[in-house]
Image (spheres, rainbow, N blue to C red):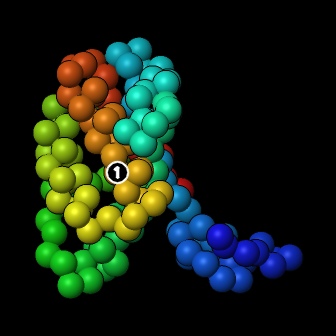
């Protein structure tokens, strides 16, 4: 767990959660009327509404340490902005997810990618739906 001093700056822990570092991004599935889809089945049990905890795959200088992975769709997401992604991009996104699952860290990162995979599969089946990525 990241500890913060009185200044709000990261004392130790993951820099992606520090006030001076990257801000975590997350993604939601939206229906054809742009409403968030809630209560998706979580592969780890229960339900979920959004996916996240895989920010390092948006920074190719980080995820590429000793691993050659080409992320055709994930590399096009602007981690600092709102990025909509329509259903016809889901096949490529699912390929990207399959590429990074073997190198994902156990815990939140792995579970976040599994949730993203669920959302991408649902989105692919619903042509009017989209994924909406929300960054810093």
The quadrant of the rendering that contains the N terminus is bottom right
- Picture residue at 17% right of the left edge, 59% below the top: 99
Residue 76 makes an appearance in the image: no
Q: How many marks?
A: 1
- Left or right of 7 on screen, residue 124: left
Q: Quadrant of residue 104?
A: bottom left
Residue 23 makes an appearance in the image: yes
Vertical placement of residue 72 versus 60, above or below:
above
- The one nearer the camera, 50 or 35, is 50
- The one nearer the camera, 135 or 98, is 98
Q: Which residue lies furthest to the top in this view?
A: 33
Vertical placement of residue 60 versus 127, above or below:
below
Location of residue 118 in the rendering, given as x and y in whole percent from the top left corner: 31, 35
Q: Element type at marker 1?
A: helix
- Left or right of 37 on screen, residue 69: left
Q: In which quarter of the image is residue 125?
A: top left
Vertical placement of residue 67 versus 55, above or below:
below
- The one nearer the camera, 67 or 74, is 67
In the picture of the structure, the residue carrying the numbered disc 1 is: 113
Q: Residue furthest right?
A: 6
- Picture residue at 68% right of the left edge, 78% below the top: 10
Location of residue 128 in the rendering, given as x and y in whole percent from the top left corner: 27, 18
- Left or right of 48 on screen, residue 63: left
- Left or right of 81 on screen, residue 95: left
Location of residue 48 in the rendering, given as x and y in whole percent from the top left corner: 49, 34
Q: Specify few, some or many for label 1: CA neighbours under 10 Å numbering under 14, 14-19, or 20 or more.
A: many
Vertical placement of residue 30 versus 18, above or below:
above
- Picture residue at 18% right of the left edge, 53% below the top: 98
- Picture residue at 24% right of the left edge, 32% below the top: 121
């Amino acid at each position: 767990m990241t500890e913060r001093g009185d200044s709000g700056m990261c004392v130790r822990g993951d820099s992606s959660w520090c006030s001076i570092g990257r801000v975590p991004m997350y993604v939601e599935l939206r229906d054809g009327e742009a409403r968030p889809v809630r209560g998706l089945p979580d592969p780890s049990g229960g339900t979920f509404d959004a996916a996240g905890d895989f920010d390092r795959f948006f920074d190719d200088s980080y995820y590429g340490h000793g691993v050659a992975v080409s992320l055709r769709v994930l590399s096009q997401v602007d981690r600092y902005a709102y990025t909509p992604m329509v259903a016809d991009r889901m096949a490529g996104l699912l390929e990207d997810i399959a590429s990074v699952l073997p190198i994902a860290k156990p815990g939140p990162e792995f579970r976040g990618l599994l949730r993203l995979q669920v959302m991408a599969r649902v989105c692919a089946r619903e042509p009017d739906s989209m994924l909406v990525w929300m960054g810093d």
